[in-house]
Amino acid sequence: MVGVAVVSRAMNADAPARMSPRDSLGRLIALQGPITVARFMAEALTHPRDGYYMRADPLGAAGDFTTAPEISQMFGELIGLWCADCWRAMGAPEPVLLVELGPGRGTLMADALRAAAATAPDFRAALDIHLVEASPALRARQEDALANTAPSWHNDFADVPQGPMLLIANEFLDALPIHQFIATPDGWRERLVGLADDGFCFVLAPGATPACALIGANPLGEAGAVLEIRPAAALLARDIAERLATHGGAALLVDFDKAGPSGDSLQAVRGHRRHDVLAEPGSADIAAAVDFTALTEAARGARVHGPVPQGEFLDTLGLDARAAALAANATPDQTAAIESGRHRLTAPDQMGTLFKAFAITAPDMLAPAGFATS
């Protein structure tokens, strides 16, 4: 990685002060050769000026994708009540950090806080709110949504102060960079991104790369099999677990998953449609499924719970009762929207089984609501 940093500085010494991800990646690859998929993802998503998450709000009908909090207020409300329940199980510490990673527009947090204020005012009063967000565009949206809550913003989880903690991360892990490896007759070879006449292309490293050390004991698959490893997620799970083991608390991580590290899940979305991952980096969201088994292994020292399907998790928390309560005083159009949101969040052919809920708790905490006793 030191070599990459040196090349980047040399590349920028005689380059324009600002370049798009396509231009900067093109120059980087031209100078040093093909780069890892992880480097490509990081540059495309978080380039300082034109990275996908840095330049604009990607959410909603006018954006590229819609997340659960934007589909229905019920999602954030139930998570707020989940947090309140965990707080009581922690012994109701005051203050308690409420941390969200990748808060989007601030919708989930706003809904969670509203539900907490209405049903658990003592919990709401104990909260010290922290948002981990690097995007200036999204921070502005969060500031509007949470104008009366005085949150603190951080660029990295490591910057969040220590203390008893409740943490939420919805569709955050899937955007963390992955390394991909392809099974060949000569063993695992890392997939890299190189240059083609019309843009970028995937190529295989001719030999072992530094990231091959991540493969560990993963057995070699059949020729062409794909292995995905996300070291940033494992490090984050380890750091969360260490904090919870030291200070107490719980973390709720919700994301789309796959069973284990095998299989090619790298994908891009633009305008609510699938998009070529390599086409016009910075113009589309890039993500890959989360390996919760790897997170379980990384979170040693704490307790892990799940993953369980999102639909099952929300149903256990009382989604149907909340939908009924909202519909009791709703217009016909509002009732239809409530039912549509409930269906999208829980139906097996929507988000109900594709997305999973996963919890990490302090070692002395019982299984939180929504998870079978473990």
Image (tube, rainbow, N blue to C red):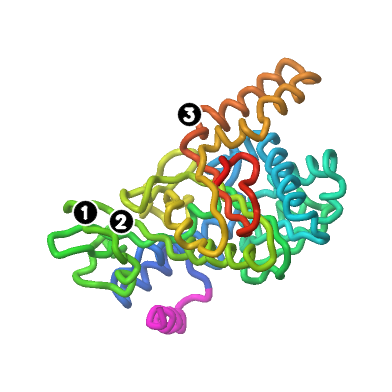
Tell me residue 317's x, y (percent): 66, 35
- Along the line of sight, which residue is nearer the eye, 227 or 66? 227
Residue 129 picture location, percent across and down: 76, 58
- Decide whether residue 26 is among the magenta residues: no
Q: Main secondary structure of the magenta part?
A: helix
Residue situated in front as seen by the camera: 301 or 174: 301
Q: Is residue 162 left or right of residue 181?
A: right
Q: Residue at the location (55% across, 33% down)?
A: 311
- Mark 3 and mark 2 lie on one chain; the one further toward the N terminus is 2
Q: Is residue 184 visible?
A: yes
| Disc marking residue 227 | 2
Identify residue type, mark 2: Leu
Q: Which residue is mark 1?
A: 221
Q: Is residue 36 above or below residue 123?
A: below
Q: Earlier in the sequence, mark 1 or mark 3?
A: 1
Q: Along the horizontal axis of the image, is 181 left or right of 357?
A: left
Compared with residue 105, is residue 314 higher up or lower down, i.e. above or below?
Answer: above
**What secondary structure is marked by label 1?**
loop
Q: Amino acid at mark 3?
A: Pro
Q: Residue furthest top?
A: 332
Instruction: Give me the residue at 27% from left, 53% from top.
Output: 226
Q: Is residue 335 above or below residue 75?
A: above
Q: Please state which of residues 128 and 307 is positioned toward the viewer in this rendering.
A: 307
- Labels 2 & 1 near each other (Cβ < 8 A): yes
Q: In 3D space, how far apart are the residues under numbered discs 1 and 3 (Cα atoms)?
A: 30 Å
Would you call the spot at circle 2 few (<14 residues within 10 Å), some (14-19), or many (20 or more)? many
Q: Is residue 139 visible?
A: no
Check residue 348 in the rendering and tell me which mark sits there, or answer none: 3
Q: Are marks 3 and 2 in contact (CB under 8 Å)?
A: no
Q: Position of residue 370 (x, y in %)?
A: 61, 39
Tell me, yes or no, whether the highlighted magenta stretch contains residue 3. Answer: yes
Q: Which stretch did the figure color magenta?
A: 1-17
